[in-house]
Amino acid sequence: MSRVARYGKLIAQPGRGRELAGLLLTAAARLEGDPRCELYLVNLQADAPDTVWVTELWRDQDALDATLEEIKGSAETAAAMRLVAGAEMIELDLLGGKGPTGQVP
Amino acid sequence: MSRVARYGKLIAQPGRGRELAGLLLTAAARLEGDPRCELYLVNLQADAPDTVWVTELWRDQDALDATLEEIKGSAETAAAMRLVAGAEMIELDLLGGKGPTGQVP
């Protein structure tokens, strides 16, 4: 299976962008030792601080699905969802470049 | 100085997305050993194959400026520019997460 690359765009309730990003950073910390996740970078859009962008790279679709299943229904996920006013996912085909782009063994 | 994170969105001339991405991959290969650039990932948007997204992470603004200065006026840059019908840059504040997020020494 091939890797899954995507940008998650989350628009927070007004004034809550940094708070939402903080919850996602907590989630990211749990991924630190998880080889299924290669990138999970949490950003605020510079000119729109209630817009959070997450750069995601997963080993494969199974890895992403399993992670989503694990966090589903948690208190942290519910807290984050309450701060989200809108969401969009940009699905990507990663072709290569500089970064964690090597083949999965 | 703090790092520079951004997504570059390039819309290619119709049917030329993969060709444009190929030119960017060539540029990325030159960055492989360059510590000023931490990420330069070239993607096609899954549902819009003439839309190229580049995930960029640079050590600081000086690093980015110097690189842009180096490639300015090259034949490769001119070839890429000819394939671009539209462009947008989403400037980000990288807060952290999993990936190359550590402090620059």
Image (cartoon, coloured by chain):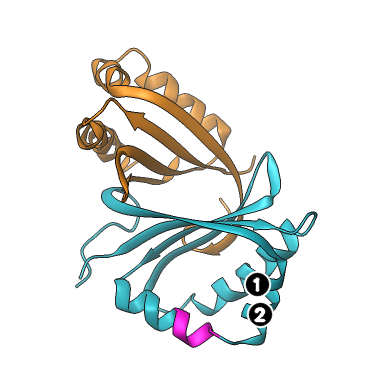
Chain colours: A orange, B cyan
Q: Which residues are magenta?
A: B68-72
Q: Quadrant of the C terminus of chain B?
A: bottom left
- Residue contact at pointers 2 and 1, CB within 8 angstroms: yes
Three-letter code for the amino acid on which mark 2 is drawn: Ala
Q: Does residue A56 lie above or below B17 as drawn?
A: above
Disc 1 designates what residue?
B81
Residue A82 position within the rendered picture, expressed as x and y whole percent measured from the top left: 28, 17
User: Which residue is located at x 69 percent, y 43 percent?
Assistant: B48
Q: Is residue B96 above or below residue B3?
A: above
Q: Which mark is residue B78?
A: 2
Residue B4 magenta-highlighted: no
Front in this rendered view, residue B73 or A6: B73
Q: Nearer the viewer, residue A5 or A83?
A: A83
User: Within 10 angstroms of label 1, few (less than 14), some, or many (20 or more) residues?
Assistant: some
Q: Is residue A102 visible?
A: no
- The x, y position of residue B68, in whole percent, is 46, 79
* Mark 2: few/some/many CA within 10 Å (<14, 14-19, 20+): few
